[in-house]
Image: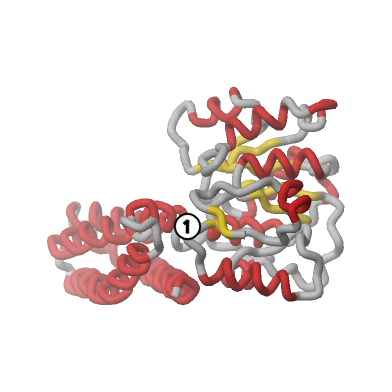
């Protein structure tokens, strides 16, 4: 089934009418491949969990030797990239999960299945997280009255957390979040915190180089609501970023504070526009150091800047490959 404007029937309705899968229009190649492969595969038509795109398929592989999880998480998220990252984190933590693309689907899922916790995005099509939380709390027989619901939102202005709590949510997790912050918050609300396995690597896990919400922003700015603008912006950045970082290096090596401030200022904006927030913060700091003539401190920052530059380029290139 192909449905327009993110309007799709609930799972029970689809089952009654014999619909095995649906795709929101305009259909993307990754989504089409996913649903066709799922229908043709010998596995059940509606598996309890599964990634939604090639990137998700690579990210969400269970950890080697992972045991079957008792705890089940409902992830309510409409952005495919955010879905992929969150699913990968849940899998790394050894947790089972199901996915809902919007608040209306979340209500259907909670009505049909028993979950231990819900991760609820706030801004979604069809029904947002606030209305979905209210509806879940009002389900018959008190089914959703005491279900822990954790808000996921990129809004971190004063009052945003209280708005989520006032809507009936139990906790608040700001995007982009790390696996450490997710695990810490989940442990507070799961029925048995000690049963949540610690699958963190022994070495520290770096946060994503790119804030994944930038893809949504660029898609919203595109005339056709497609990924063409994101592809164009990312491609231009990949073509020009090398020259920019070379200018920063040259300025630092030459001890030219004025050139450093000028170059870092330009890069601070361009990196922010592609979602490279950590790299943008580095350039912001270099700009201040350049304007203050603190070239020794700037030289000390250069290895970190180059590291973040390489990470950002690698992740943007991966996005372009998946969006091709």
- Name the quadrant containing residue 54: bottom right
How far across and how far down the image is residue 52, in percent? 62, 64
Q: Position of residue 229 (x, y in %)?
A: 33, 63
Which of the 4 quarters of the picture holds residue 131? top right
Q: Farthest residue toward the front?
A: 17
> Callout 1: helix, strand or loop?
loop
Q: Nearer the viewer, residue 286 or 240?
A: 240
Query: Is 284 situated left or right of 207 in this image?
Result: left
Residue 129 at x, y percent in the picture: 59, 37
Image vertical order of residue 74 relative to residue 232, above or below: above
Towards the viewer: 93 or 121: 121
| Drawn side of residue 264 relative to residue 169, left or right | left
Q: For the C terminus, which image quadrant? A: bottom left
| Residue shown at the point (47%, 74%) measured from the top left | 318
Residue sitting at x 58%, y 69%: 32
**Residue 128 or residue 234, whichever sits in front:** 128
Q: Which quarter of the image is occupied by the N terminus?
A: bottom right
Q: What residue is drawn where x is 58% and y is 43%?
A: 121
- What residue did someone put label 1 on? 212
Q: Position of residue 250 (x, y in %)?
A: 20, 74
Residue 277 in view here: no
266 with respect to 311 (left or right): left
Q: Is residue 107 above or below residue 214?
A: above
Task: From the viewer's side, name the closer residue of 246 and 250.
Answer: 246
């Amino acid at each position: 089934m192909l449905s327009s404007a993110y309007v799709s029937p609930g799972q029970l309705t689809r089952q009654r009418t014999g619909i095995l899968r649906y795709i929101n229009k305009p259909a993307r190649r990754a989504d089409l491949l996913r649903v066709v492969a799922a229908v043709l595969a010998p596995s059940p038509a509606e598996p309890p969990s599964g990634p939604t795109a090639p990137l998700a398929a690579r990210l969400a592989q269970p950890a080697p030797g992972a045991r079957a999880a008792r705890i089940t998480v409902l992830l309510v998220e409409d952005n495919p990239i955010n879905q992929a990252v969150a699913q990968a984190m849940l899998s790394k933590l050894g947790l089972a999960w199901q996915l809902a693309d919007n608040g209306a689907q979340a209500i259907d899922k909670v009505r049909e299945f028993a979950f231990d916790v819900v991760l609820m995005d706030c801004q979604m099509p069809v029904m947002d997280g606030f209305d979905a939380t209210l509806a879940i709390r009002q389900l018959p027989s008190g089914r959703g009255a005491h279900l822990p619901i954790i808000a996921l939102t990129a809004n971190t202005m004063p009052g945003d957390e209280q708005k989520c709590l006032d809507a009936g949510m139990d906790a608040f997790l700001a995007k982009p979040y790390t696996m450490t912050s997710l695990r810490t918050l989940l442990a507070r609300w799961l029925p048995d915190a000690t049963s949540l396995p610690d699958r963190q690597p022994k070495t520290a896990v770096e946060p994503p180089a790119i804030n994944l919400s930038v893809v949504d922003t660029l898609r919203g700015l595109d005339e056709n609501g497609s990924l063409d603008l994101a592809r164009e912006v990312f491609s231009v950045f990949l073509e020009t970023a090398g020259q920019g970082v070379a200018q920063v290096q040259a300025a630092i090596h030459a001890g030219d504070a004025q050139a450093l401030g000028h170059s870092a200022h330009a890069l601070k904006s361009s990196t922010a526009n592609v979602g490279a927030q950590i790299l943008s913060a580095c350039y912001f700091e270099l700009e201040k150091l350049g304007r203050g003539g603190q070239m020794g401190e700037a030289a000390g920052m250069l290895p970190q800047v180059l590291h973040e530059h390489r990470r950002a380029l690698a992740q943007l290139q991966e996005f372009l490959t998946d969006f091709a």
